[in-house]
């Protein structure tokens, strides 16, 4: 029995020594080699873009100026020249180009270890929904043109909030209303029968009639209506005496009376 106990104790001690040696080997392998080469510093142009505080969700509004701020830091250790900042809209599923956005030209130098913030804005006229916005910049370093990505993310296209005091909408409504009113008036005149205006006939004024008086009656009887003409008196046994004959007899009688008075004197 004593022999068995001694053998078991030796086995336990051997196993414990084996575990301790394995742990020390793992520690030595995981410890960094101080004599090895250090990781090289990455020297590049760091660029990023952010939305303003007024647009925390990064919505792109149709018909409005969408502004962003581009942050730059030159870590290349060399002087580089910023040429331009541009962007594009893509389909988020197929990555197909939908439209190129505004390209802003700068042509300014970027000094080493200097941070710079530049504005970038674009206009949107897309169907509401999700699209991928890609913004990049082009710079010149050692006479070589390079492109650096600035922003690449999915954005939501939204319509602007409506307002009753929108001048653009009011002017549009006025123009459309005027056009509809004019077309309605033309259609009314074309298809609705209009009442004809009666024309007043003016009586033709005849030329003035000149009446010549005769020596006998002083007027012409043909102008007098029949029912106003005086009826002629008929004498028995003799015809009607004309006015000329009466005037001649009267004058001869008057002359005979004058001669008789002269003889008496």
Image (tube, grey):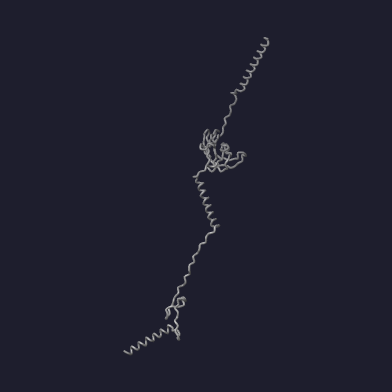
Q: Residue furthest bottom?
A: 263
Counting every numbered tag in the picture gives 0
Instruction: Residue 115: give x, y in percent of width and height.
Output: 52, 34
Q: Residue furthest left?
A: 265
Q: Is residue 220 above or below residue 88?
A: below
| Nearest the eye: 240 or 127 | 240
User: Which quarter of the rendering shows the C terminus?
Assistant: bottom left
Say left or right for 146 vs 221. right
Q: Is residue 192 above or below residue 121?
A: below
Say left or right for 158 vs 218. right
Q: Is residue 229 above or below residue 69?
A: below
User: Which quarter of the rendering shows the N terminus?
Assistant: top right
Q: Residue furthest top?
A: 2
Instruction: Residue 177: give x, y in percent of width and height.
Output: 52, 50
Q: Quadrant of residue 144?
A: top right
Q: Quadrant of residue 103?
A: top right
Q: Is residue 138 above or below residue 237?
A: above
Instruction: Residue 236: give x, y in percent of width and height.
Output: 45, 85
| Nearest the eye: 52 or 108 | 52
Instruction: Residue 141: give x, y in percent of width and height.
Output: 56, 36
| Nearest the eye: 231 or 175 | 231
């Amino acid at each position: 029995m004593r022999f068995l106990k001694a053998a078991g104790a030796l086995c336990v001690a051997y196993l414990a020594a084996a575990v301790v040696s394995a742990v020390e080997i793992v520690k030595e392998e995981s410890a960094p080699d101080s004599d090895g080469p250090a990781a090289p510093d990455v020297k590049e142009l760091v660029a990023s873009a952010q939305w303003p505080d007024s647009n925390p969700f990064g919505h792109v509004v149709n018909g409005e100026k969408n502004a962003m701020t581009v942050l730059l830091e030159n870590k290349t250790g060399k002087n580089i020249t910023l040429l331009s900042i541009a962007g594009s809209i893509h389909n988020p599923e197929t990555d197909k180009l939908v439209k190129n956005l505004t390209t802003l030209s700068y042509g300014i130098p970027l000094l080493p270890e200097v941070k710079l913030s530049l504005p970038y804005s674009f206009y949107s006229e897309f169907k509401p929904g999700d699209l991928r916005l890609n913004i990049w910049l082009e710079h010149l370093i050692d006479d070589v043109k390079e492109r650096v990505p600035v922003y690449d993310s999915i954005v939501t296209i939204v319509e602007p909030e409506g307002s009753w005091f929108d001048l653009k909408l009011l002017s549009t409504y006025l123009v459309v209303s005027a056009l509809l009113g004019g077309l309605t008036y033309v259609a009314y005149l074309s298809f609705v029968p209009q009442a004809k205006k009666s024309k007043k006939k003016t009586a033709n004024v005849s030329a003035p009639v000149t009446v010549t008086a005769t020596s006998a009656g002083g007027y012409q009887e043909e102008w007098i209506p029949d029912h106003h003409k005086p009826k002629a008196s008929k004498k028995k046994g003799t015809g009607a005496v004309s006015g000329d004959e009466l005037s001649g007899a009267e004058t001869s009688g008057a002359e005979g009376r004058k001669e008789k008075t002269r003889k008496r004197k």
